[in-house]
């Protein structure tokens, strides 16, 4: 493959990642509504810890740096909290 084709493929993957992040944050909005309906707190640290543990374990299976994956998801969780607090 030539450099332009490789870069185009990366661009397409980046676009897919952004769409998936957008979809995830749309679901966060729905979760916010459901938590309010059920009278639950918006932040669930136990759930957040389970998510991080599961994803860092899965990252090892994919030969990804688990610290990197944890950092990415900590940012995603932080933004999810921000969205839910609006």
Image (cartoon, grey):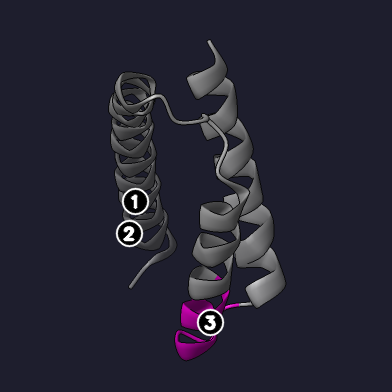
User: Between tags 1 and 3, which lies in front?
Assistant: 3
Q: Secondary structure at mark 2?
A: helix
Most common SS among magenta residues: helix
| Residue in the image at 28% along x and 35% along y | 23
Q: Residue furthest top?
A: 86
| Residue in the image at 30% along x and 46% along y | 16
Viewport quadrant of the N terminus: bottom left
Which residues are the magenta region?
Answer: 56-64
Q: Is residue 60 above or below residue 18?
A: below
| Residue in the image at 34% along x and 39% along y | 24
Which numbered dot is residue 57? 3
Residue toward you, 33 or 20:
33
User: Residue 37, image x and y in percent?
Assistant: 30, 20
Q: Is residue 82 left or right of residue 26?
A: right
- Crowding at dot 3, Cα within 10 Å, few <14 / some 14-19 / many 20+, comes out as some
Q: Is residue 44 above or below residue 61?
A: above
User: Residue 33, image x and y in percent?
Assistant: 32, 20
Residues marked 1 and 3 touching at CB (< 8 Å): no
The alpha-carbon separation of the residues under discs 2 and 1 comes to 5 Å
Residues marked 2 and 1 touching at CB (< 8 Å): yes
Q: Secondary structure at mark 3?
A: helix
For marks 1 and 3 on the same chain, the one whose residue lies earlier in the sequence: 1
User: Residue 52, image x and y in percent?
Assistant: 57, 64
Residue toward you, 70 or 5:
70
* 38 drawn magenta: no
Which residue position is annotated with label 1? 8
Which residue position is annotated with label 2? 5
Q: Is residue 56 left or right of residue 13?
A: right
* 59 drawn magenta: yes
The alpha-carbon separation of the residues under discs 2 and 3 comes to 32 Å
- Crowding at dot 2, Cα within 10 Å, few <14 / some 14-19 / many 20+, comes out as few
């Amino acid at each position: 493959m030539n450099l332009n084709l490789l870069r185009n493929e990366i661009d397409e993957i980046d676009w897919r990642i952004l769409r998936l992040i957008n979809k995830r944050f749309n679901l966060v909005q729905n979760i916010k509504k459901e938590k309010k309906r059920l009278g639950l707190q918006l932040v669930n640290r136990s759930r957040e810890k389970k998510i991080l543990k599961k994803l860092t374990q899965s990252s090892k299976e994919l030969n990804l740096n688990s610290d990197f994956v944890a950092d990415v998801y900590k940012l995603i969780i932080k933004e999810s909290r921000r969205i839910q607090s609006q």
